Image (tube, helix red, strand yellow):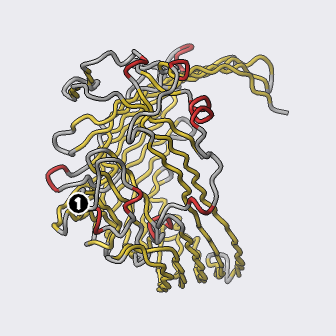
Amino acid sequence: MFDKVFMELKNTPFSYDDRPTIPVNTYGKDITDPNNWAVQRLDVQENKITNQYANGKLQAAYTLNEALTFKAGGEYKHFINSGYTWVNKVFHNVPADIAIPNTLKQTVTPDTLIQYIVGNVDGVYSYIGDNRNLTAANLQAGSDYRVDEKTGAGFAQFDLDTIVAGMRLRANAGVRYYSTDLLSSGHLATGAGFTPVAIRTNSHGFLPAANLALDVAKAVVVRLSASRNVNRPALGDLAAAGSITTRPNGGSLSLGNPFLKPFKATSVEGSVEYYMGRSGFASVGFFYKSMDSFISSSTKQIPYGQTGLPLSLLVQGEDANTLFDVSQPVNGAGADIKGIEVAVQHDFTFLPGALKNLGAVVNGTWFDGHQTAYYNNVPKVIPLYNLSKWAANATLYYENKLWGVRVSDAYRSSYLTGAGNAIDNSGDGIRGTNNVDFQAHINLRPGVRLIAEGINITNEPIVQSLDAVAQRTEVYTTSGRTFTFGISAEF
């Protein structure tokens, strides 16, 4: 639940420049002068999301001989996700501004690049007298929903552990059957408004899988696996509901889709692992996943009057003809993802003297995956969300019986978080990051150690951008450096 006071400064020129690393705003009036500011509106909002779980499973195993074991079992899962939004939004600048004393206006308390005036929330609400206690009568149209998912599944599997041509082979193969019933109830947007619905769907199928690990040498293991799996939509995506964001020049509407279907995929993975006794290991692996279809985003710009939502949700200056960005998850074309991972961990025991307590852990991955997004029904291939093409981690450590220290570096290249609102502005994302952390400890006595940690010691920013090609800065955030000190004890 939150209460907001929106202040406004009228009739002033302003500019926004996103060319610098940190975007720059400039204004034609003094934005720290309380006399220039007045109350625009007061918003009270209450959001509730409830999750309920019920799970049960039963498994059994039977040893057929020294090398072969048969396993079988079943499980049942019941998950309910429901929610609503209550709002009370009142404008106080028409037909004229409601005056509030300057004592209820203040500059921003936290550190900020530019100081400006905000309203004292409790003081302004008390002075104006708006209702802050919401009830069901304040339900935002189309925001209430309930998703009820029930899944029954069973599996049968054989496990093998034997010797083949002098090499140890460990393997398993089996099949799983599942059946999922889903009921999504809420409201769907139609030309006549939001219509109550209750959508029932069922998905079912068989999912085979096999895994093997072969010790081709004393210190070398080759692994290979193949499987057929199912990916279900997020329950939030299945909700027959929507959320709206308004702004003076338009807004956005995010809708769920109770007609979404799960999609199946075929996965293949393999790796070669080399173990260097107790001092370390090295591995190279690959993976490939082909999805029959993929849940992607459909985005379009339409007049607000076509969304089915009531005009009462709009802000001043908007009407039924105001263009809104409307996004909704859809079952799109298939997608695929592939990648390679290399990892090495080694204690430098070969070094002389105290240097033998040094060690390092390094890993790196390359990913490639694409999906099809839709902009006003026009398809465009874009990278998968939350998938960086390159990622790498490195840790250098030193540890002896008395003390130890680790310094870690984590790199991640840029990645997408959303489809964007237009085909020529496609791809909302996060620029690449490189975070450095450290951890040190001193053993005071057996089981008791003094610990110091530093997180993000270079104060790496998080930069949200628009357009995957142009990467125009939208939000620049720094969280600062975090240092912690403590004592841990084991008994």
User: Does residue 14 sit above or below 164 in this rendering?
Assistant: above
- Dot 1, how many residues are within 10 Å of its Cα: few (below 14), some (14-19), or many (20+)? few
Q: Is residue 200 visible?
A: yes
Residue 63 or 100: which is nearer the viewer? Answer: 100
- Say which residue appears at 40% left-offset and 15% top-offset: 33
Q: Secondary structure at mark 1?
A: loop
Say above or below: 170 vs 370: below
Taking the image as shown, residue 60 lies to the left or right of residue 314, namely right
Residue sitting at x 45%, y 47%: 274
Left/right placement of residue 319 relative to residue 217 reads left
Residue 226 coordinates in the image, percent (x, y) = 41, 71
Residue 442: percent from left, percent from top: 69, 17
The answer, for residue 348, to whether it is visible in the render is no
Judging by the rendered image, the residue that carries numbered circle 1 is 321
Residue 137, quarter of the rendered image = bottom right
Q: Is residue 295 above or below residue 462?
A: below
x and y percent of residue 69 in the render? 64, 78
**Of the residues shown, which amino acid type is indicated by label 1?**
Asn
Q: Quadrant of residue 31?
A: top left
Q: Decide which of 170, 344 is in the foreground and name it.
A: 344
On the image, the x and y values in percent for residue 489 come to: 79, 28
Q: Which quadrant would the C terminus be assigned to in this image?
A: top right
State the image quarter where residue 440 is shown: top right
**Residue depicted at 60% across the width and 57% down the height:** 48
* Closer to us: 327 or 68: 327
Up/down of 27 relative to 231, above or below: above
Please identify the residue farthest to the front as the structure is shown.
Answer: 95
Say how many tags the image has.
Answer: 1
Q: Residue at x 65, y 80 (%)?
A: 71
